[in-house]
Image: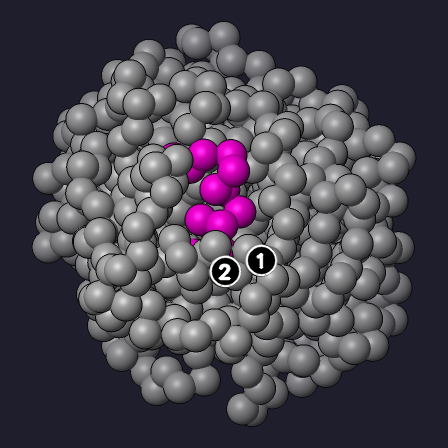
Amino acid sequence: MGTALVYHEDMMATRLLWDDSECKIECPERLAAALGSLRQCGLEQRCLHVTAREASEAELGLVHSPEYVALVRGTQTLGTEELQALSRQYDAVYFHPSTFHCGRLAVGAVLQLVDAVLTGAVHNGLALVRPPGHHSQRAAANGFCVFNNVAIAAEHAKRKHGLHRILIVDWDIHHGQGIQYIFEDDPSVLYFSWHRYEHGHFWPFLPESDADTVGQGQGRGFTVNLPWNQVGMGNADYLAAFLHVLLPLASEFDPELVLISAGFDSAIGDPEGQMQATPECFGHLTQLLQVLAGGRICAVLEGGYHLESLAQSVCMTVRALLGDPVPVLSGPMVPCHSALESIQNVRAAQAPHWKSLRQQDVAPVLSTSTHSTEGKPLSPLPGDPICKAEAEVASLSFLLDQQHLHPTPPVRMAITLTAADTTLALSPHVLRQEGSSPKWETEAWARWAGQAGESVMITCVSVSVTDVLSPGVWSAHHRPHESLAQDEALGKLLYLLNGILDGQVNSGMAATSAPAAAANLDVAIQRVLSLGAQRVLCVVLGHLDRPLDLADDGRILWLNIRGKEAATVSMFHVSMPLPETTGGFQSCIFGLVLPMAYGFQPDLVLVALGPDHGLQEPQAALLAAVLRGPAGGRVLALLEEKSAPELAQVLVRALYGEAPPSLGPFLAASLEDRQALMSLRAQLQSRWEMLRVAASESTEGRGDS
């Protein structure tokens, strides 16, 4: 199983035959740019090629009326003037003699992809298609869209494959009202769309694009609109929308398939969106969606009109689908005030329909009087850093050039070998590490860990951390026989850690004995800092106390998810009991751990499963999978060597990039877990602004004009 790439060169045939400033941006060069970049980056060659086919008229009829299909079929014989006259009957549409053929290929490509994913021929994939589809309705073309590719695919998945729960994620910058209309009363399809709205002053100018439109009849709660009311939304805003709106609802919905209406006019540089999200952001969003539906994702191209930004964003999406690490997110991880207003309103509108939101702190809907209602677009304040990407980025070209500075490490995943894990059935691409750090280095760190464990401060040790790494410092000391095995494990850990830090290995898992777990974690932290890392995130489960000698200076963020009680020891030392239910665990991950992790922007993530960690295998896999994002995939997991092989197996697979298994049926968080999470968020959000889910006075003015 792998990643499919579906396209057909014939889809480049349609183009505008007359002057039209509005429609000229939907051009064949869009596909050419995306394909060219995939080839240049070596990504196309790694995908399974699937040739698109023409959809049958019966398949088009899953969504569209026979009369409309016949009308589009008739465009094949029309002249230019007749095509232009017909196009004027619709909003922002042009027809071409090849439109019917290309439209059928676009639908057929998506159906090919859905069939391949749902039959297990591939795990996920991308359909590069045009014309786009999410605006087209049952009997009308609209917004460059002729046939509704994704809507037809959802109906096909239900009827041919018997699916009952399909999630459609529309991150195009325009509202996909066509999809919304088709499924507005259908509880088997959860439709999420964010879109540039500006209080109804941006195309398509529809009141039903606002947050208070939640679906009709049995479909109430299954339409989720998140309107962006100003331009300039960036990585932090998009990520906050996923963490605080989409992922809680989607996890409760538990989809069997995820369809992405992947429009990249929401990326930086696009003239339609005027947003600031960088290409790697879409890789992160894709990674987060891979924790749903067993990773069965079909991404389908919609908009995207800045060719270079489109091409790079497509590449980042495919990298994530392939399981590759994605570069860290750039820019300040602080959502702007306008984004928080939108998130607050959609959470309030959806809370009556979803347990996952009712169990959280949901602020009331904001009055329209609190919003700007002027017809002009809103833009960020001059020089304001919140709703922009990096302040030092002088141009889009410079930003896109930076993507080439993050090569994929030659080894994606490595694991240390001990007697306990040699029987693991691993992918042949996972390196079984045999190497170890030099004996003198291992013994030096072991001696340092022993002294530190006796509460001797680093500054009082007779040699510094730098001196520890000098050959011969501890050579005269003979290690006790019972420490040899622990030294061996520590040597392998150091060797693996060095490989991650020098870019040879992306992520890894190291075995450690229970008595040495805390000491080895301490050594790993100090080793990372000694090699120049600025920020290290430690996510600890089980009985592993925070080392007393860790300075609370912002370099270490320590999150203990199996603490005795919910406690904020400091803004960089947080403890929370392990939630008892699936809903509680998901709220902890999406509502606390990930917002803090992304806000911290670590150079490395250390995950330590100590004694009595309490994690079930699906929980461990979910935690490992989502923590790949904040540090660009650089994650090192420490696991007791006596742990069950099944636990090691799921951790390795998750860190390698495979989708984690389902947590099982959704069970709402207990009252105690809800109160603990809300208390921690209230205490921490003054420092960790990615935790915010509502606008407040403290965010007033950020990014607003």
Q: Residue 377: which quarter of the image?
A: bottom right
Closer to us: 573 or 347: 573
Q: Residues within 10 Å of mark 2 (few under 14, many from 20)?
A: some
Residue 104 on the magenta span = no
Residue on which the image places disc 2: 451
Residue at the image position 81 percent from the left and 71 percent from the top: 696
Residue at the image position 38 percent from the left and 62 percent from the top: 527
Residue 511 on the magenta span = yes
Left or right placement of residue 28 versus residue 527 in this view: left
The quarter of the image holding the C terminus is bottom right
Is residue 146 something one can see in this rendering?
Answer: no
Q: What colour scheme does the image use?
A: one colour
Does 583 sit above or below residue 446? above
Residue on which the image places disc 1: 454
Q: Are marks 1 and 2 in contact (CB under 8 Å)?
A: yes
Q: Residue 692: which quarter of the image?
A: bottom right
Is residue 570 something one can see in this rendering?
Answer: yes
Estimate the x, y position of residue 205 in percent, counting from the top left: 63, 59
Q: Which residues are magenta?
A: 510-523
Residue at the image position 58 percent from the left and 23 percent from the top: 616
